[in-house]
Image (spheres, coloured by chain):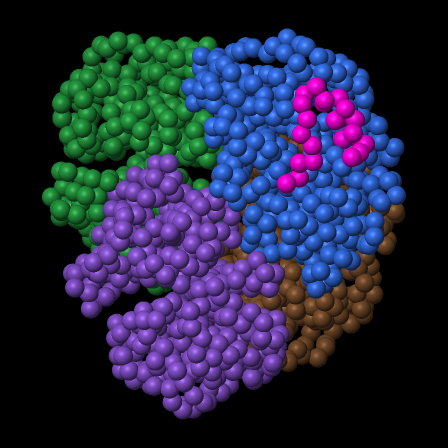
Chain colours: A green, B brown, C blue, D purple
Amino acid sequence: MKAVVFKAPYELSVENVADPKIEGPLDAVIRITTANICGSDLHPYEGRANLDAGMVLGHENMGIVEEVGPGVDRISVGDRVSVPFNLACGTCRNCNNGYTSACLRANPSGQPGAGYGYPMMGPYWGGQAELLRVPWADFNLLKLPEGKENESDFTMLSDIFPTGYHGAEMAMVAPGKSVAVFGAGPVGLMAAHSAFIKGASQVFIVDKEPDRLALAEEIGATPINFADMDPTEAIMEGTDGFGADCGIEAVGYQAHDHTGEEHPEMVLDNLVKVVRATGHIGVVGVYVPEDPGATNELAKEGRVAFNYGEVFTKGISLMGGQCPVKKYNRELRDLIIRGKSKPSWIVSHEVSLDEAVDAYAKFDKREDGYTKVLLHP
Amino acid sequence: MKAVVFKAPYELSVENVADPKIEGPLDAVIRITTANICGSDLHPYEGRANLDAGMVLGHENMGIVEEVGPGVDRISVGDRVSVPFNLACGTCRNCNNGYTSACLRANPSGQPGAGYGYPMMGPYWGGQAELLRVPWADFNLLKLPEGKENESDFTMLSDIFPTGYHGAEMAMVAPGKSVAVFGAGPVGLMAAHSAFIKGASQVFIVDKEPDRLALAEEIGATPINFADMDPTEAIMEGTDGFGADCGIEAVGYQAHDHTGEEHPEMVLDNLVKVVRATGHIGVVGVYVPEDPGATNELAKEGRVAFNYGEVFTKGISLMGGQCPVKKYNRELRDLIIRGKSKPSWIVSHEVSLDEAVDAYAKFDKREDGYTKVLLHP
Amino acid sequence: MKAVVFKAPYELSVENVADPKIEGPLDAVIRITTANICGSDLHPYEGRANLDAGMVLGHENMGIVEEVGPGVDRISVGDRVSVPFNLACGTCRNCNNGYTSACLRANPSGQPGAGYGYPMMGPYWGGQAELLRVPWADFNLLKLPEGKENESDFTMLSDIFPTGYHGAEMAMVAPGKSVAVFGAGPVGLMAAHSAFIKGASQVFIVDKEPDRLALAEEIGATPINFADMDPTEAIMEGTDGFGADCGIEAVGYQAHDHTGEEHPEMVLDNLVKVVRATGHIGVVGVYVPEDPGATNELAKEGRVAFNYGEVFTKGISLMGGQCPVKKYNRELRDLIIRGKSKPSWIVSHEVSLDEAVDAYAKFDKREDGYTKVLLHP
Amino acid sequence: MKAVVFKAPYELSVENVADPKIEGPLDAVIRITTANICGSDLHPYEGRANLDAGMVLGHENMGIVEEVGPGVDRISVGDRVSVPFNLACGTCRNCNNGYTSACLRANPSGQPGAGYGYPMMGPYWGGQAELLRVPWADFNLLKLPEGKENESDFTMLSDIFPTGYHGAEMAMVAPGKSVAVFGAGPVGLMAAHSAFIKGASQVFIVDKEPDRLALAEEIGATPINFADMDPTEAIMEGTDGFGADCGIEAVGYQAHDHTGEEHPEMVLDNLVKVVRATGHIGVVGVYVPEDPGATNELAKEGRVAFNYGEVFTKGISLMGGQCPVKKYNRELRDLIIRGKSKPSWIVSHEVSLDEAVDAYAKFDKREDGYTKVLLHP
């Protein structure tokens, strides 16, 4: 089959590799119809995550079931399905508790949590390819309505829509609440969208890219360009000095100020300032336990020197982590089916698998308005 | 002051009565700007609740603070406020737990729960009048933005908007869920509206009045006229045979079939049929512990012979009761302020206090499209 | 193998039947070490549930894994395991949500929920036998510490300990709460024990059997013999007239007064009287959607004419249904391991499989202090 | 009246000051029967918090109501009461939501949260005195049973028992969970006790003081002396390498290693290591938004450079802050009344008010086994 293969930092190729096949009784093989490029695919692309040459990339996948193992009986050949980016066994303690993001058995390394297209998440090839093997298929796959409708909406169900929603959930967004989202990349936009789905009365969103802020404004969020103004002042003013009820971090450890300098603690510090006492912060921007390439000594060890004293004094709760996609994807799918959600509004480009190398390069440089790219094998 | 006074069943008058005044240090007196007629005002009107002649009616009140007692320091003269229909002390165990609907101290009878305009809810005059005394004013009153904007929206905050929302809350409506609402009176309509605020993907609403169903359709609900079809079949079909995740009862013990015959167990039975196993039912339609005027022996004792065996077998949770308004009114107010909710869409008539007698008569007979009536003193 | 086989009402035999074997890749076969007789085994025994001749009885099972199918990789041959009485697929929507009690796929009849030893719960033989086939073994089985320690404690994990705990959970028992349990059979005793585990300050327990009440008293509960006194008065007095925070129903539709007359609504009525306004009731006593053998017309249709008007007026929540064992069994196991719980205190008899016929007969007649019987094949 | 008055760091005196009196209609004056010295009283004592000379110390108070204002009608003269250390208005948004720890109106500075005996918590004298003025008395005071029984248990209800419990609550301790508590001072001991009340199967507690660890062992906790061993290794080993479900921080920003060197991030780092992926940490040890006296530049600004990257990767929730005492004190009182809790087991000394100066000095130096000191005026 054809697949997007990692060769070296900034060097991918679309080439023929061996077809994945059923390896165990609970496996399925999916014929990919859409695979998205994710912002986190840029970490290995830029050489910031160790990826072995030869790995097939991609963890935002959907398609049609091509073949199933003898132990698969919920999912059938021909089903149209979404593939959650976290790959989970369905029977361990964490899976039992709904934390498929911390499956204790799927990652041979012993670390909780497994996924596609990253060596540290297990030996599972990604789905930017024609075919994808999915272990524990009955547990992992979400059925979608037959046909081709809403393809570019449903494709958001594998990762960024649930991930944004997870941010809103951990921030305890509820009807009437005010929400401050930092970061208007695809995940931040999905967090803002999710906050409205959950009934927020007002959503502020902070970024420095006018095109992303414009996408946020389309769904009713209040854009704040931190290149132009102090975002904490803007939010405090917009909440009559009270602060927002909920804060969502959708940036991560590579946060940089408008001059481009990295400040890992900057976004958390800002959130703590604008979220009111007794409020809640949900973190979906990625922080890492070690970052050998960082310039800062603390950051190398995963330390983030934010004002935790203020967090404590204000009694703010701080929840974060990888999204357990299965916890949310069924209900989000139903919102799409019923026309209550249309997450495809952020899609900027849809290209064929053959164009993937070029799409990566442009997405990495944020050229030509590359916000969210879908690959169609 | 002028007030709507109960004289006898089907006999009200608008007449002059003594002005309410500050009786204790925590009282406030409110100059009423809007007081709604509620469906439950028809119980005493029709003689189905014992009301003493001379009582001033009305528990859906808002206005401007006219005077405060010496212990009131959060609320000030001139504040525009909504008055929750449940009157609560703010310091008893139930108030501490957020159940202002079951205040242990405000009702001298010793029954949990107090309110305006009903002798069994305590000796508190109603607000269909020029002035209203509010005890424990700092605790009970909700501040509104100054001015006159959104008056017919904010007036829903004293009772029916939170009450409908309470139904959705107890039914555990959440993003993506399907919801079946029985009853499209003002509370049922607010329940449907609240279900969408909470992110429902689909809301079915059952009634036999086309004008009410039309109001529900305006906000995107799926109307089901039970005079024309079996509502349980319609909902099962609309959910692909699975049933709805959530059910809301907005009818109460006076439920009657399309021929007009009363069947107190009918709505609960229907809900149990259409709500899926492990689903949730929230009950805001009123059921009473005794109903001496009922024709049925069981109903006289408050007994409702619904299929509880089915409830158990399906593992459905059943929550119900009077809404603790303060639990919700602040957030619902903020949704109105931010333009995310416009509950006034159900208002059919706005009249002066002098026209109240006529309005009651027409509302009771459902004449001239009387759905929701606002009185402006 | 040897097994307890149902022949006809009041007629069982211990006889040789074909060994169960691996039928699908996810099956395991367990060598039973302990299988309990449950109160609900008496329903078919007494002919009150339709059971086909030839069915092997028993749904409270534990043992050692004897063989596993090729798709089983969490559980290994030789593991000591507890088998939850609800048999669940692990991949349907209800299983995903933790409701293994309402699995949508395990019962071929299409009804939610499957189990062992009951034709209406699916074609799965029970475990009062030497061997038991367990489908979806990786999902269903709970690992226990190796060896033989705590056998008579761990055997409670398959049903009644989690079931009693589920009652306490649905009644929202929490530290400091007062609790009223109706029924001091094995499940009621486990509910009382669970209420203390959850931190209750006081637990009342109502029954008419002195030996059961004595077992309750051993763990600190306050026994109330309703043959001697009005239990509602006793509980109101014991809570200074306030009522209990939480109520647990552990009796079911066959509730009878101290003269032996059946009153399906009696226990619910009593609970509604003694649970305080805004309190919570958890129902684990079984109610059925239809009971053709009942003498009462309402009861035949599963209708229970309790005072729902009072439930509404007091704003009491009412949750009930079959326990999803997996939701609780791991944590309860850990309490046993750490010596914090010893549910075996209720065991009255331990006998060999050969003595099962006699044990059933005596348990059915409550002879010789038969409270809880363990069979050891 | 006689009172403990702050003069200067390390300089207190017991002297006569003006009697507090009713200043507003909602005030009460309490005759103190017991006032405890709290570890946080040592911050001003040591000069680490700015306290004005003349302030009366003490925020852990109980006594008998001596006089009430005209607006007080729930509490009566003669009532025995516990005074929560957080002083709250009962009518602001945060009080409505149960966060009396973040009352928006009681502290004239405008900071959320007020209390006794600290200028930054408002102008309210403490209760290490014969009398104490309590504003909003009906809202703030908890009634206790008449008499003198359980005085040294009930006195824990004003602060440390609820505070320890709050730690267990935020750490989501529940039946069967394993818990790691860092810090075995009075709050840590109450956290361990609370963890068992909530049903923990195992509680590890880490400190370096053998007498405190011995107190923890008395209630069944597993003591770990970090002067003797690496506490993270001990806990990982004690949980079979899995980690604890829940972690409680009961140390705070002045954490120091066994050599006495301060490491503000040390305890959080250790907790993150020992709490399992998807676990929960509750922080009740105090962290401050600025600490001008700190030696470390980060600490001066309230920054705590712990491994937040690890927190994110493990998906651990982190909640913390001042305890809202009213949320818990009623239920904890009932556990004491019913004999289910006896928090006085940690009391080391009970002395008269006249001996307070000496008691402070000894408590500060941890002399003579001073663990928890009660003053009886």
Numbered disc total: 0
Main SS type for the magenta part? helix
Give the extent of the magenta segment. C345-368
Q: Residue furthest left?
A: A295
Front-most of residues A35 and D82: D82
Residue A263 vertical position relative to residue C85 in the rendered view, above or below: below
Q: Is residue C15 left or right of residue B376?
A: right
Location of residue A229 in the rendering, given as x and y in whole percent from the top left corner = 22, 55
Location of residue D165 in the rendering, given as x and y in whole percent from the top left corner = 46, 57
Q: Is residue C356 magenta?
A: yes
Location of residue A71 in the rendering, given as x and y in whole percent from the top left corner = 47, 13
Residue A277 vertical position relative to residue B262 in the rendered view, above or below: below
Instruction: Name which residue lies at 56% across and 84% down.
Output: D66
Location of residue C29 in the rendering, given as x and y in whole percent from the top left corner = 54, 16
Residue B224 vertical position relative to residue D77 in the rendered view, above or below: above
Q: Is residue C334 visible?
A: yes
Q: Is residue A230 visible?
A: no
